[in-house]
Image: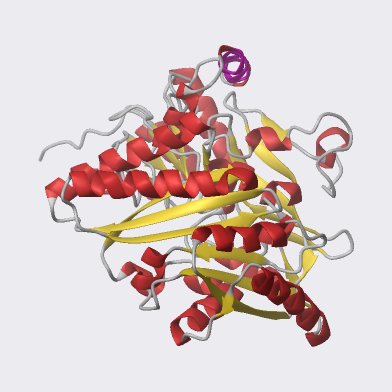
Amino acid sequence: MTEVKHHVLYNELAAIAGSKYVSDDDFVLFAYSRDTGPFPGKIQGIVARPASTEEVVEIVKLANRTNTPVVPSGGRAGIYGVPPGSPGRGIVVDLTRLDKVLSIDEDNMCATAQAGIRLAEFDTKLGEKGWSIHTAVAPWYSDTVGGQLSALPGGGAGVETSAVGWNRHFVNGMKVVLPTGSILQTGTGGNVGKNVIWAPEFGGPDFTPMFIGDAGAFGIKVEATYRMFRAHPIRKGGGATFKSFEDLYRCYRSLCLIEPAPYAILSAQSPFSMKLMGCPEEWTFMWVAAGYSEEEIALKSKWVKENIERAGGKEADDPGVMEFVKMQCVGKSIAEMGEWATPGRYALMEVVCPLGQLQECFTTMASLTTRRLEERDMIARRHESCVACGCNTTIFSQYIYWDDTDERYREGILEINKEFFDVAASHGWMPDTNQRNTCKTVAKYWTPAFYNYMATIKKALDPNNIMNPGMWGDL
C-alpha cells in the first residue's frame, strides 16, 4: 500500500483545526484555485478551515515560524484572480466556519458578526428584528463579511449606496489577526477594552479604514461591527428614457446635488444593457426611493420626476424596464445574477470615477471594449451601467457575456480585462474591487512616496511577508 504524502504542515494544522477541516487533496486544492473570473488559477499547498479566532491565531503563528505564505479565503466570489500565495506550498485559511452573529445591540445600534458569515444570513437575521446594515448588494448569497471588507474599497456599496455612500462610513470596528499572530481590535473597543464598539474614530487614530480594501494583505479579519439602521419598510421606484447620454447625465448630476438625497439608488443603463434585457434600446435612467411612509415616498418621487422632466427625459412604461426597477427595489433579488447569467459566462469590469468625470469615463471605457471586440472579431452580449455611490462618486460597470468553450474568446476577454483596468488606472479611475489583477494594476501607478508608505506598513505588520504576499505588486 502506497503511503499518502501530505503537506509538510499537515499534522500541525490538523492538530489546530481538526483533521476533518484540513486537506491537501488535489480536488480540494483545485476548488480553491480559481474565482469566477477569466484569470488562470493558483493552486496552493493545503487548506485549513478554523472554527475560532484562537485557531486562526495558531495557524498564523505556525505560518510565521515556518515562513509559509497564508491566503485568507471567504466566499470565493472574486472576479479578478485569486491571490498568488505560494503555489504548492501556501496555506489557504478558509474563514467560513466563523459564521456567527455575535450580537445585535439595539440600544447602541450596532451589530457584530464573525467574518465568515454570508451577507445573506447576517442581513436576514437583522431584518427579522427590523434592522439593516449597509453591506454589498451583490454577490449577496456568497460574499462573506471578511471577504467584502478585504476586497471591496470603501467596504462595498449596498442597496442604498446612492444616498449614503460607501459602507466604510458604517463599520464601527473590526477584530483582525495580524500576520504575527497578535489580535488587534479597532474602533472604540481597541483602547478601552469594553464590549461595545460604538464608533471607529474615538480613543485615538482610526485604524479601521486601513484594513478595508487591503486585499487581505494586512491581516485576517475575524469579526466586524457595523452600525445598524431601522429598515425602510417601503421601497418604490421608476424609470425614464433619454435621447442621449448627455441628457441622461444632466438629470443624473442634478439629482446627485440634492441634499438630503430623495433616492436610495440612481442607476443609468446603456442601449446595450436594455437590449440584453429585452427592452427598447434607449439610454435609460432608473431610481429607487426608500422611506417609512407613503407620503415620504411620494414627495421623494416628485423631486426625481421634476428633474427627469427638466432634463428632457420621458417616464418609462416598458414592462421590462419596470420589472428591472422592481428588482432594484428589492436589491437582493439580483444578487446572484439570476436570469442575467443565462446568456453565458460573463466577465465583470467595474471602476469608480468622480461624478464630474462620469461622461468621460463611460465613453472611454465603453469605446475601448467596443474597439477591442471588433478588432478580434468577437461577438459578445454586453451590459453597461453606472450607479451613484454617494453624491460625488459613481461605479461604471460593464459585463461581457462570452463563450467559455472557445479558447479564442477566453484569451481575448482576458486581454481586454487587463487593458480595461490599466487604461482606467492611468486616468485615475479606480477598480471597485481589490483582487489579484486589479491590485497589481493599481500598484503600478502608485507614486514612490505611496509605495514606500505601503512597504513600511507591510513590513511593520508582516515582517516575514507571509500574509497574502505579492497582492500589491511585489508587496
Q: Is residue 296 visible?
A: yes
Q: Nearer the viewer, residue 276 or 305?
A: 305
Furthest residue toward left: 1
**Magenta region: which residues?**
449-459
Q: Is residue 189 left or right of residue 250?
A: right
Q: Nearer the viewer, residue 422 or 26?
A: 422
Q: How is the image coloured?
A: secondary structure
Query: Whole-percent x and y of residue 12?
Result: 43, 32
The residue under the point 43% across, 19% down is 474
Query: Whole-percent x and y of residue 453?
Result: 63, 16
With respect to residue 206, does 273 lie above or below?
below
Q: Nearer the viewer, residue 16 or 158?
A: 158
Query: Whole-percent x and y of residue 277?
Result: 38, 74
Q: Is residue 392 left or right of residue 360?
A: right
The residue under the point 61% across, 71% down is 312
Q: In the picture, residue 6 is in which quadrant?
A: top left
Q: Is residue 30 left or right of residue 199?
A: left
Quadrant containing the N terminus is top left
Q: Is residue 157 magenta?
A: no
Query: Whole-percent x and y of residue 13?
Result: 43, 36
The residue under the point 52% across, 36% down is 215
Q: Is residue 50 visible?
A: no
The dominant secondary structure in magenta is helix
Q: Nearer the viewer, residue 70 or 305?
A: 305
**Total number of numbered discs in the rendering:** 0
